[in-house]
Amino acid sequence: MIRHRLSCLALSLVIALSLLAGSCAGSGVGALVTLALLQSYSPSATVTSAPTVWPTPTVAQTAAMTGSTLYVESATIEAVARVAPAVVTVINTLPPRRAFWQVIEQPEAIGSGVIIDPAGYIVTNNHVVENAQELSVILQDGTKLPARLVGTDMYTDLAVIKVDQAGLPAAPLGDSSALRPGEPVAAIGSALGDLRNTVTTGVVSALDRALDTGAGYQLEGLIQTDAAINHGNSGGPLLNLQGQVIGINTAIIRGSGTSSSVAEGLGFAIPSNTVRQVVPQLIEKGYVSRPDLGIGHRPITPQLAGYYGLAVKWGELVINVPADTPAARAGLQRGDIITAINGQAIDEEHPFINILLRYQPGDTVQLTIQRDGREQSLSVTLGQQPR
């Protein structure tokens, strides 16, 4: 009833306006308009709202979106053109091995690297040059040069090698702390070893990731990207749109050892700010100064703790304490379980080695230990890992 009254009121207004128009433009026209409205009107008609539609972008909006796309494309092209001449293929000739029918093979491992100094210093991954008997690099133009190992650091998976040729193109390092998820990036490297200077693009997927190496420590602070990183890309640069190296590509993940799921687009790079900290030490000393307790040790996990009936689920079991070591001088004993360093508990996300690596040789730290089922605290001055 209410809808009917409202409809009648609306019709009355329309007719009145039509008659007014008729008086101004001629009574014949006004009458025709009124008649048409009366014939189309039905009191039982239901008024429905117009369907909701997405608004069509304006010309200015379309131009802005197109302009942004073109900017990213042109910036990527310029960034790659700037850095590509500094990207090299790294060939690691491994020690010979005896193969089938007593044939001696000389295996090779191939990765990538990036020149960071015109004097010929090249950054790559530690795992690319590991166990090398001989090293060489191939420049962008195909020139092959012998290289020598300058230094390595397993805890960051970084290494420096050098070629004896001056005036080489060098890539600038950017500030990895300025990265944001979603930022466009490009990776360059020798995909599959043979496809030199392959370029892939993507975005920064996440920051500050950690990867378990399976050797009792994690690679920390990594950049996660969906830019395709194939075998052979290890050691190559990850670039921002300014043509700066903001990471050294180090790993890809295809799946989990505990799941049948297969993942794509999970690449990881060592941040350029880590490179800034580590590489100068590798060039100067050939290694990075790392703290040391001087003990033999192995990690304790909940599974191991449950099997042996230990009082703690996480920690580091002291296997041996050689004489005249920082641990021996602090009173650490074989069978002790270290559960924390300076209050930071050892657990799955904080392995013993990673906590220890936060400190420098000469620092004094407090160890929380379990001995004979009782918690104790020991003060120890850290030594330096032997070379």
Image: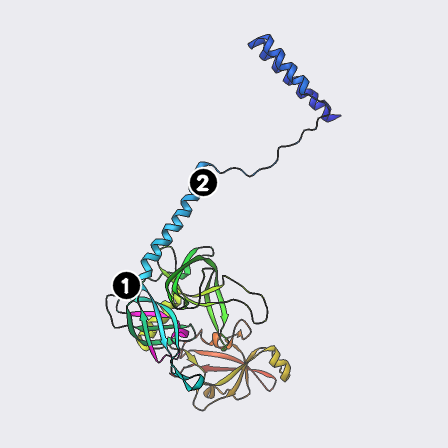
> Dividing the image into 4 quarters, which one contains the C terminus?
bottom left
Picture quadrant where residue 337 is located: bottom right
Residue 169 pos. (x, y %): 28, 63
Picture quadrant where residue 54 is located: top right
Q: Secondary structure at mark 1?
A: loop
Q: Amino acid at mark 2?
A: Thr
Residue 197 visible (yes or no): yes
- For label 2, count other residues whose C-alpha is less than 10 Å away and answer few (under 14), some (14-19) or many (20+): few
Q: Which residue is mark 1?
A: 169
Q: Amino acid at mark 1?
A: Pro
For the point 47% across and 36% down, the residue is 58
Closer to the chain start, of discs 1 and 2, is: 2
Looking at the picture, tell me which residue is in the foreground, 258 or 121.
Answer: 258
175 lies above or below 317:
above
- For label 1, count other residues whose C-alpha is less than 10 Å away and answer few (under 14), some (14-19) or many (20+): some
> Dividing the image into 4 quarters, which one contains the N terminus?
top right
Residue 62 shows which numbered tag? Answer: 2
